[in-house]
Image (tube, rainbow, N blue to C red):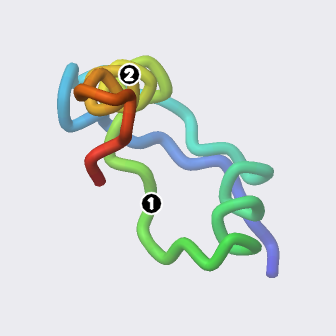
Amino acid sequence: MSYQDKSITCRDCGHVFAFTASEQQFFAEKGFTNEPKRCPTCRRAKRDSTSATPGGQRTW
């Protein structure tokens, strides 16, 4: 399958970010069917905030 870069608007901050062809291929190889909804910065912030639970366990 041929992938092309896409521009996506982050649902948290409204920043437009690139979902590159290589990222799309990675997502497909991992079996992910949804495109990211957050930019890399907001994804990292979300991941860091959810991993700050007692015991350091992630909650998703």
User: Is 38 located above or below residue 28 in the figure?
Assistant: above
Q: How many marks?
A: 2
Q: Quadrant of the N terminus?
A: bottom right
Q: Give me the disc on residue 48.
A: 2
Where does residue 50 sit, x and y in percent of width and height?
27, 32
User: Is 31 located above or below residue 20 in the figure?
Assistant: below
Q: Amino acid at mark 2?
A: Asp
User: Is 38 located above or below residue 37 in the figure?
Assistant: above
> Which residue does the numbered mark 1 point to in the structure image?
35
User: Mark 1 or mark 2, which has the lower sequence index?
Assistant: 1
Q: Nearer the viewer, residue 4 or 27?
A: 27
User: Is 1 located above or below residue 16 in the figure?
Assistant: below
Where does residue 25 sit, x and y in percent of width and height?
76, 64
Q: Residue at x 27, y 47 (%)?
A: 59
The answer to whether the residue labelled 1 contacts the one labelled 2, judged by CB atoms less than 8 Å apart, is no
Disc 1/disc 2 C-alpha distance (Å): 20 Å
Q: Nearer the viewer, residue 5 or 22?
A: 22
Where does residue 13 sit, x and y in percent of width and height?
21, 20
Where does residue 26 sit, x and y in percent of width and height?
75, 60
Q: Nearer the viewer, mark 1 or mark 2?
A: 2
Give the structural element (helix, strand or loop) at label 1: loop
Picture quadrant of residue 20 = top right
Q: Quadrant of the C terminus?
A: bottom left
Give the structural element (helix, strand or loop) at label 2: helix
Q: Residue at x 70, y 50 (%)?
A: 23
